[in-house]
Amino acid sequence: MELGVQGLNAKAVIAPGHTARLARLAEELGYTSWWAGEHVVLPSPRVPAAPMEATDPILDPLVHLTFVAAVTTRMRLGTGIIILPQRNPLVLAKQAASLDVLSGGRLLLGVGAGYLEPELTAVGVDLATRGSRTDEYLDAMASLWHDPAPAFHGRHVSFDHVDAHPRPDNVRIVVGGHSPAAFRRAVSRGHGWFGTGGPDDLPRHLDGLRRAAAEVDRPAHLGQLEITYTQLDPVRLDRAAVDRYAALGVDRLVVYPLPLTDPDDVARFLEHHAGLGASTPSP
């Protein structure tokens, strides 16, 4: 089981010096992936569903990961997650391909449908269409990346007689979410699934994925579904928890060094958890 780190594109650790120091440290310690979340805007005043205050800084994940790519050589670079219906899929496909090429094929493009209605509304997306947009946008980007003559015609996006190069080296799609629709999307369109929660939540999510696998087809080219999981509660892990995740079949366990108020505390957190089983990534 590999070990990754999440969330260091936010709050007190976003300065370039802190990012470079912590990213290099994580890679030296054997972390195999570095994940960045997204909120384009946040409701002000804060509503209960919002994970952050509107005044908490959070960098765009693709911009942040491009910086991280420049100061590391091996770690996978993951978006955990991009809120896909808020993005133009052709523009995102170009951005993702560019980052993948510049990083030497290290991008893990984590996407989700989103849930925070004030944010979706502010960028012009109806909450009711977020699922159908997510599915269409994934299919549209796949055509642009892989088809000899890219084309897609759907309700929310339509194009043909266009192309975009360079094509990505190795973008892998990771679908986030805990709803039945998200589980079906992960099975049918994702190389992997990205979940969050505590150790007692994971068995329920894995059951959801198994039910989805019985309901939708999984294309052979996607291979086996990879399980990426971020523990949020409690934040700190011990050996028993790590062993339990491994036994449940987690491929990539991602730690989240909340509350992200002190870069030195984050460094100590990374050092502590690296001893719980991070494996050395392949170049």
Image (cartoon, grey):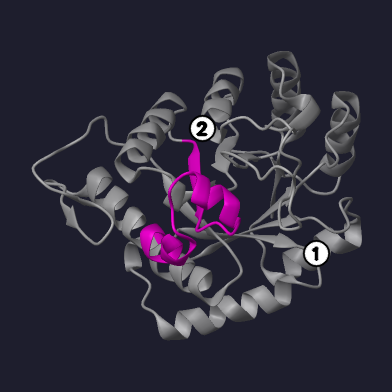
Residue beneath the point at 71% across and 24% down: 14
Is residue 169 visible to us here? no
Q: Quadrant of the C terminus?
A: top right
Q: Please say whether residue 149 is one of the residues in the magenta stretch.
A: no
Number of marks: 2
Q: Please say whether residue 126 is one of the residues in the magenta stretch.
A: yes
Is residue 248 visible to us here? yes
Query: What residue does disc 2 label?
Result: 62
Callout 1, which amino acid?
Gly
- 163 horizontally vs 135: left or right: left
* Magenta residue span: 106-134
Residue furthest left in the image: 161
On screen, 203 above or below 77?
Answer: below
Q: Nearer the viewer, residue 104 or 46?
A: 46
Which badge, 1 or 2, is on the more N-terminal residue?
Answer: 2
- 180 horizontally vs 96: left or right: right
Provide residue 254's location: percent of width, then percent of height: 71, 49
Provide residue 128's location: percent of width, then percent of height: 45, 67
**For the residue labelled by badge 1, is the local secondary structure a helix, a strand or a loop?**
loop
Query: What residue does disc 1 label?
Result: 198
Callout 2, which amino acid?
Leu
Q: Quadrant of the N terminus?
A: bottom right
Mark 1 and mark 2: span between their CA atoms? Answer: 27 Å
**For the residue labelled by badge 2, is the local secondary structure a helix, a strand or a loop?**
helix
Residue beneath the point at 56% across and 43% down: 79
Q: Nearer the viewer, residue 283 or 141?
A: 141
Residue beneath the point at 33% across and 61% down: 221
